[in-house]
Image (cartoon, rainbow, N blue to C red):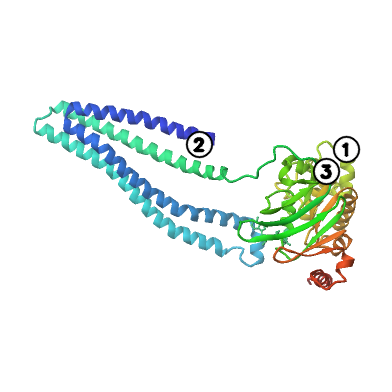
Amino acid sequence: MINLSSTVAYYLYRNFRTIASLAVVAMLSWIWDFRLGLLLTLGVPLYLLILNLSKSFINKGKAMSEPCEEEVASRMVEFAKCQGALRACHTGSNYEALSSALKKADVVGKKSLAWQSVGMFLGGMAKQMLVTVAILLIVGLAVKRSIDVFPAIACIGMVLSFSKMLEDVSGNVAGTEERRQQMDRIDALMDTGELKEAEYSHEFKDIGSIEIKNVSFSYDKKNRVLNDISFTVNPKEMCALVGPSGSGKTTIEHLIARFYDVDDGSIKVSGADVRDIKIKDLMGQLSMVFQDVYLFNESLLDNIKMGNPNANEEEIKKACDLAGVTEIANRLPDGWNSRVGEGGSSLSGGERQRVSIARALLKKSPIVLLDEATSALDAENEAHIVKSMEELRKNATLIVIAHKLETIQRADKIVVLSKDGRIEQIGKHDELIKKEGAYKKFWDYRVSTSNWQLV
Ligand SMILES: Nc1ncnc2c1ncn2[C@@H]1O[C@H](COP(=O)(O)OP(=O)(O)OP(=O)(O)O)[C@@H](O)[C@H]1O
Ligand SMILES: [Mg+2]
């Protein structure tokens, strides 16, 4: 950003300097001959007008090709990163989306080139025309003896340096324009509305409680994802969120952590509205164990200590034993000091989630938001996660997006969501299972499919 603005400042300075020189030369030309003075004085605005037209042609060409170039770039990244999924769909080497993006970029690229070429031709031609007319005028004056030969040669030299200055001005204008477009893009990014941070945090009156009241929410301010959701979770209760895919379970957890603001209603964490809590204090109340766990490319130990940098060795050992991270460290070549790769790429999905659980155990926050793995975990991973959840439950409120039948059954409260993001039922397993309703249907279906296996 600093480089960009200093480059713009550099171009502006050069432009002012050159324009001042142009003005001096134009004034001098009046002294040589008023016709030459008139030509250069009127020629410059005309030249700038044509230059402007040429610039708009060039910009039109660029605006055409840029979205296609961006599409090609993102499809290429997708092609490289998602080879596994593409191969599974038999499209590992022939990815239609990339081929059609390349084809479109080729067609649009030719049109864009045509517009840009016309623009460049106009810009170049305007300058040449001005210089040619000026030289012809000087030669004509010399032939008619209105001007002597030597002053005429000097005059042609002046016109040539005048044209060089014009070239500099147009180059600087193009440079400034290019940087301005880059700065506009940065401005647009910076102008994206941020969530308003509370100036001070309201007092936590009921540590560990969660109160969701008449909450409605949409990501795009058009399509409602959550509709009038209300439920409360008392301190140290375990609440299971269940419902079909896309019903808004993850969205509810994200709203509790204030990744977004609700459109209507309110969410209270530990007795205070999340909008009235400073983000740092809100994060102090919450631990999050989501499915897409991101680890930093630091050592295994550093990643765990992020949960609580002040934790002592004994606390770290206890959390890691329980979450099954000690076993991972024993297996890695550099033990606790092994680096986990970008995003945790050198660990499996189950292992990354165990690290995330160890962080949560270490943090000892009053509330834990957990998104249970949808895929079946191996017995070892499963056992560690069950034990850790039991431990977390002793001291924290748990909101679990539950997929395992045991988790749902053990919950103090089950919130059943419908496909359109409304609450269908709330209650305990024993009560809900006796009623004909969404939960019973969901449960019967899950039980009947729980023994299915892919062979
Ligand atoms: N960042 C986002 N931007 C726009 N729409 C989103 C975003 N995240 C989720 N959605 C949409 O919101 C709806 C609810 O998504 P959400 O992830 O909360 O569902 P879910 O119940 O957690 O589903 P699943 O069980 O598949 O994880 C879906 O229709 C989804 O497409
Ligand atoms: Mg989800």
**Residue at the location (18% across, 29% down)?**
153
| Residue with the mark numbered 2 | 4
How much space separates mark 1 and mark 3, taking CA atoms? 32 Å
| Residue with the mark numbered 1 | 313
Which numbered disc flags the more N-terminal residue, 3 or 2? 2
Indicate the secondary structure of the residue bearing disc 2: helix
Considering depth in this image, is 189 or 207 the residue closer to the camera?
207
| Quadrant in which the N terminus is drawn | top right
Considering depth in this image, is 22 or 253 the residue closer to the camera?
253
* Mark in front: 1 vs 3: 3
Q: Is mark 2 within 8 Å of ligand 1?
A: no
Q: Is mark 1 within 8 Å of ligand 2?
A: no
* Mark in front: 3 vs 2: 3
Against 262, residue 1 (above or below) is: above
Considering depth in this image, is 330 or 410 the residue closer to the camera?
410
Classify mark 3: residues with Cα within 10 Å, few (<14), some (14-19) or many (20+): few
Q: Amino acid at mark 2?
A: Leu
Indicate the secondary structure of the residue bearing disc 3: loop
**Residue at the location (71% across, 45% down)?**
275
Against 49, residue 7 (above or below) is: above
Image position, residue 212 (x, y; %): 76, 54
Classify residue 317 as left or right of residue 50.
right
Give the number of the disc on residue 205.
3
* Mark in front: 1 vs 2: 2
Indicate the secondary structure of the residue bearing disc 1: helix
- Answer with the quarter of the image where residue 335 lies: top right
Q: Amino acid at mark 1?
A: Glu
How much space separates mark 1 and mark 2, taking CA atoms? 47 Å
How much space separates mark 3 and mark 2, taking CA atoms? 49 Å
